[in-house]
Image (cartoon, rainbow, N blue to C red):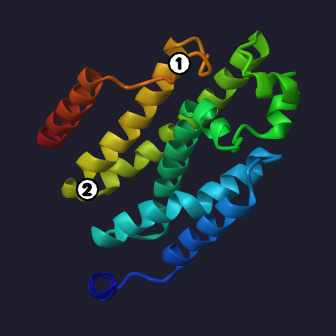
Amino acid sequence: MIALRETIRRFDIPPRPFLDLLIAFEQDQRVKRYDTFDQLVGYCRNSANPVGRLVLALFECIDEDRAALSDEVCTGLQLANFWQDVSRDLDIGRVYLPAEDRARFGYTDDDLAARRSTPQFRELMRFQVGRARGYFDRGAKLLPLLPKAARIDVDLFIRGGREILDAIERAGFDVWTARPEVSKWAKGKLLLGALVRSWTA
């Protein structure tokens, strides 16, 4: 806490991101399922987006435009992780696939409890993957607005999140049978690509 205090002072970090994270931690204890996508995005606003804003503060490049684009990246990352971990989350009693979306695609609570990989489920996951990709597409506009030192990390976050979504698609949107993974080879390619782009930018 002493080190954190000094960091907050050094970079003039406001309390809001830390308070939002505490709200998310508390929400995790109370809310296990979400009725609407808007509610889920509201959770991401407190659980994921503050992390990006803290990164911007540490690189001393935070303003409203960059913060808004960072929010897109961070929400996209949170959603990608949710869709990758549908089975793991259900193991601990958590369901991040919104009830309104499950109903829209005809995927019932019984189907969910039985972990059925039905055509309806795969279409539901196709829809959610497309949604998450939209966040990365919008958030990628942040990259040229960042100092070079921050650009490599953020580029990796975006490309890593997209690779998770690609892995889900390669699995035919069936995340029940096996957890979609990003291979070590793919991670190495992502890192090399980010480094090359940083050198040529």
Task: Give the residue displayed 66% in from the left and 57% down from the top.
Answer: 43
Task: Give the residue displayed 82% in from the left and 30% down from the top.
Answer: 102
The residue mark sitting in front, 2 or 1, is: 1
Task: Give percent across and percent down for residue 147.
Answer: 24, 59
Give the vertical position of 73 relative to 176 (above or below).
Answer: below
Front residue of 30/126: it is 30
Give the quadrant of residue 196. top left
* Residue 138 visible in the displayed image: no
Q: Which residue is mark 2?
A: 150
Could you tell me how far apart the alpha carbons at marks 2 and 1 are, in whole angstroms?
Answer: 34 Å
Secondary structure category for the residue under label 1: loop
Give the vertical position of 194 relative to 7 (above or below).
Answer: above
Give the vertical position of 122 relative to 162 (above or below).
Answer: above
Task: Give percent across and percent down for residue 188.
Answer: 21, 28
Front residue of 1/80: it is 1
Secondary structure category for the residue under label 2: helix
Give the quadrant of residue 92. top right
Give the vertical position of 29 relative to 168 (above or below).
Answer: below
Q: Amino acid at mark 1?
A: Ala
For this view, does 157 lie left or right of residue 111?
Answer: left
Category of crowding for the residue at label 1, using alpha-carbon neighbours closer than 10 angstroms: few (below 14), some (14–19), many (at least 20): few
Q: Quadrant of the C terminus?
A: top left
Q: Amino acid at mark 2?
A: Ala
Which numbered tag is attached to residue 178? 1
